[in-house]
Image: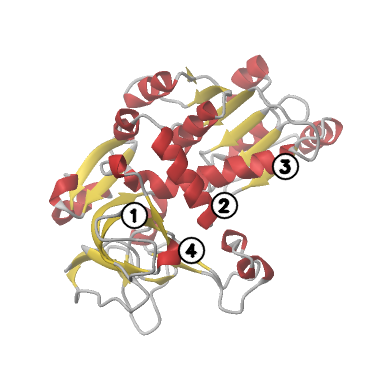
């Protein structure tokens, strides 16, 4: 079979390799890979910035945004041949820590977790793969063209869960949400916000291309000004920050209404400094009971929530997020950004081209 592999830590080592077909254990699903989403994490691993190969190997099969179809399943697994599925990325640490022991492995406390396609486990970037039933989630059959969005949707499903849990420390009835960034995470966060009945606003710097239209089709409002100006106008109850841009992060922290929640999902680049009025930010957060929380990854519960959210969404809108589908033989094109990209997908099967 063909697999997309990389030597972690070595820039330019990504290649399409021939690998033996996987042989499932008696308790594993054998899956035909359909599609693989490409995100910033994949590009950073391909650039040699981080990543860890499985023990005993110098190469890592890349890919954590999966979509596949079950070819073979154990009789008592809850899955059957033909099921459309996505694989969970993270696995709990072997010790395990208290969070991992309770199924909250996205909150691992000792850092000994592993992740498919990222940290010490081969990913889903191959024409076939295996997965344990307890780390697979079934998708609505109507999502065959867009189910590859499952993993990023699980990330924002978790973020919205965290926002709800924090809000419920007191009376919480949010009305307005501001999403900063109209990439896949921002747009999927906006989708879930709309599904929750919020007045959703999305801020991004571009004024043309697919993003403004995608926001409008959701029934949300698109902005291209500054966070400070838009937040002053809206006084949002919730800001979900999906860019990781330092100045936007601090503007978001200073931009909510009273008892506001800022959820940070964008990962910032280290080594950049900003001049900020830390005293003013602290004063506002304390006096208004504001909260800033970081959120990353997802556990099985969040994947289930993501599957439900995708099943409720308009498949045509979801398909609009996928702006390019690249055959696996042309995988390099997927790692070269274009101005109008939202989500780029590698087609592992011809049906996804």
Secondary structure beneath dot 2 equals loop
Going from N to C along the chain, the mark reached first, 4 or 1, is: 1
Say if residue 319 shows up in the picture: yes
Q: Locate residue 94, reporting x and y percent.
A: 56, 78
Quadrant in which residue 41 is drawn? bottom left
| Residue 100 screen position, x and y as percent | 61, 68
Q: Earlier in the sequence, mark 3 or mark 4?
A: 4
- Labelled disc at residue 85: 1
How is the protein colored in the picture? secondary structure
User: Above or below — where is 93 with respect to 233?
Assistant: below
Secondary element under disc 1, as helix, strand or loop, is strand
In the image, what residue occupies the spot 57% across and 37% down? 241
Left/right of residue 126 with respect to residue 27 in the rendered view: left
Residue located beneath label 4 in the image: 90
What is the distance, in whole Å, between disc 4 and disc 1 at their CAs? Answer: 16 Å
> Which quadrant of the structure image shows residue 172?
top right
C-beta proximity under 8 Å, tags 3 and 4: no
Name the element at disc 4: strand
Residue 104 in which image quadrant: bottom right
**Residue at the spot 86% in from the left edge and 31% down from the top edge:** 287
Sequence order check, earlier mark of 4 and 2? 4
Indicate which disc residue 271 carries.
2
Say left or right for 56 vs 252.
Answer: left
Percent of width and height locating residue 275: 68, 37
Residue at which label 3 appears? 166
């Amino acid at each position: 079979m063909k697999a997309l592999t990389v030597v972690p830590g070595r820039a330019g080592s990504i290649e399409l390799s021939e690998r033996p077909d996987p042989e499932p254990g008696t308790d594993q699903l054998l899956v035909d890979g359909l599609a693989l989403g490409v995100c910033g994490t994949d590009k950073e691993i391909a650039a040699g910035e981080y990543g860890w190969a499985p023990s005993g190997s110098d190469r890592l099969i890349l890919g954590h945004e999966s979509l596949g179809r079950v070819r073979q399943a154990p009789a008592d697994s809850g899955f059957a041949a033909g099921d459309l599925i996505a694989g969970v990325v993270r696995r709990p640490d072997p010790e395990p820590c208290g969070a991992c022991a309770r199924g909250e492995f996205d909150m691992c406390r000792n850092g000994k977790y592993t992740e498919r396609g990222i940290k010490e486990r081969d990913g889903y970037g191959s024409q076939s793969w295996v997965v344990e039933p307890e780390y697979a989630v079934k998708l609505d059959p109507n999502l065959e063209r867009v189910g590859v969005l499952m993993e990023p949707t699980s990330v924002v499903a978790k973020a919205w869960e965290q926002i709800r849990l924090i809000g419920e420390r007191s009376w919480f009835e949010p009305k307005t949400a501001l999403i900063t960034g109209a990439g896949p995470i921002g747009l999927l966060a906006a989708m879930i916000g709309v599904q929750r009945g919020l007045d959703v606003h999305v801020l991004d710097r571009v004024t043309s291309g697919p993003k403004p239209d995608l926001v409008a089709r959701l029934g949300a409002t698109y902005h291209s000004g500054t966070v400070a100006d838009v937040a002053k106008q809206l006084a949002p109850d919730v800001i979900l920050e999906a860019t990781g841009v330092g100045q936007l992060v601090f503007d978001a922290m200073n931009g909510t209404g009273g008892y506001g929640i800022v959820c940070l999902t964008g990962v910032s680049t280290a080594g950049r400094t900003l001049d900020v009025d830390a005293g003013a930010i602290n004063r506002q957060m304390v006096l208004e009971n504001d909260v800033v929380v970081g959120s990353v990854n997802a556990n099985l519960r969040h994947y289930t929530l993501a599957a439900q959210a995708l099943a409720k969404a308009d498949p045509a809108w979801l398909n609009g997020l996928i702006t390019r589908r690249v055959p696996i033989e042309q995988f390099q094109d997927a790692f070269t950004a274009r101005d109008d990209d939202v989500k780029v997908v590698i087609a592992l099967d011809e049906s996804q081209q």
